[in-house]
Amino acid sequence: MIRIENLQKSYAATKALDGIDLSVAAGELFAFLGPNGAGKTTTIRILTGLTRLGSGRALLNGHDIESDGIAAKRQCGLVPQHINLDSELTVLENLDIHGRLFGMEPARRRQKIEELLAYVELADRTRSLVKQLSGGLKRRLMIARALMHEPRILFLDEPTVGLDAAIRRRIWALVKRVQQDGTTIFLTTHYIEEAEFLAGRVAFIDQGRIVAIDQPHNLMARLGHWAIDQVNGEGMQTRYFPTREEATRFSAGQDCGFTLRRVNLEDAFLALTGKKVL
Ligand code: ATP
């Protein structure tokens, strides 16, 4: 559904993307995980036609984003990082305008709006002005808007940034449902738990390069399954173990404090890049 070959993009002296290659199959939920400035938003902006690529090639459902840009764009629904709804308009009007922009007939728009507002649980807010909605409701409306024209691929750029934990989980449930209903999802995040919980496969991105792509459990298993954190004179040290028994055996011989925990994606990212995601 998504194919990217040697994608490069520079802004003056900054190499935002330094040769990205990846493929995402139809129906996958794929996550780009990386720190600020890694190149996540740039990738989404290029794929959705908001920024020109520097060099390389990208295809969306077989349509080249450069030579077949309009068809490629029709494959995409985009939920950008920053809220860009029309705050002086109602929930319904925001969806209706989007439908018009995509040339949807009035009857089809009405039907789709009703269906989507029920889907994202906003049916009781149809006539509310967007400026009256909370952050979580605005995010759900942005997802509904991105799905209006029935795209094959949904791009979500940091979909839960700034939301509290309970609301974040509701968005996760919604994103999972969209995937289960057949849409391919490409999301960027710098939240470890978000990538671990949602993604079938994760790409670690750092300084415009992909450093690893795999299923979350495989990325973590490269280190082991259990970790022991210890604070000593040199700061925090973490050791990894294949089994809980081996970690416990090691900890029995320690006279200073430690924490025993499961290995997470942050450990895997740190091991590969030498830096934390956040
Ligand atoms: P964040 O989560 O902070 O948005 P990101 O991983 O999405 O990070 P990008 O926004 O893609 O990263 O930025 C990648 C690099 O390109 C950064 O060094 C950034 O400063 C630079 N960059 C992005 N957009 C522009 C622009 N329009 N002009 C100049 N430099 C840019």
Image: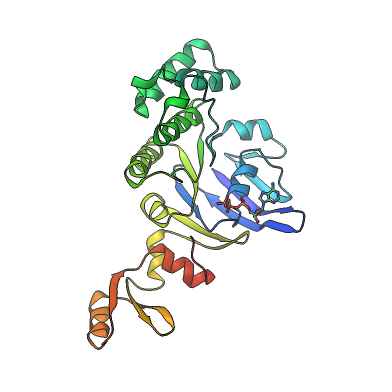
Q: Describe residue 127's horizontal placement relative to residue 208 as left or right.
A: left
* Number of marks in picture: 0
Q: Quadrant of the N terminus?
A: top right
Q: Residue visible at 39% across and 23% down?
A: 117
Which of 267/183 is in front?
267
Which of 66/117 is in front?
117
Which of 62/221 is in front?
221
Which of 9/64 is in front?
9
Q: Quadrant of residue 162?
A: top left
Give the image location of residue 266, x and y in percent.
43, 64
Q: Residue visible at 23% across and 80% down?
A: 248
Give the image location of residue 278, x and y in percent.
48, 60
Give the image location of residue 77, x and y in percent.
53, 34
148 shown above or below 15: above
Q: Describe residue 225's horizontal placement relative to residue 134 as left or right.
A: left
Give the image location of residue 128, x and y in percent.
42, 19
Q: Residue visible at 46% across and 25% down?
A: 130
Q: Residue furthest right?
A: 12
Q: Quadrant of residue 120?
A: top left
256 shown above or below 191: below
Q: Describe residue 136's horizontal placement relative to residue 75 as left or right.
A: left
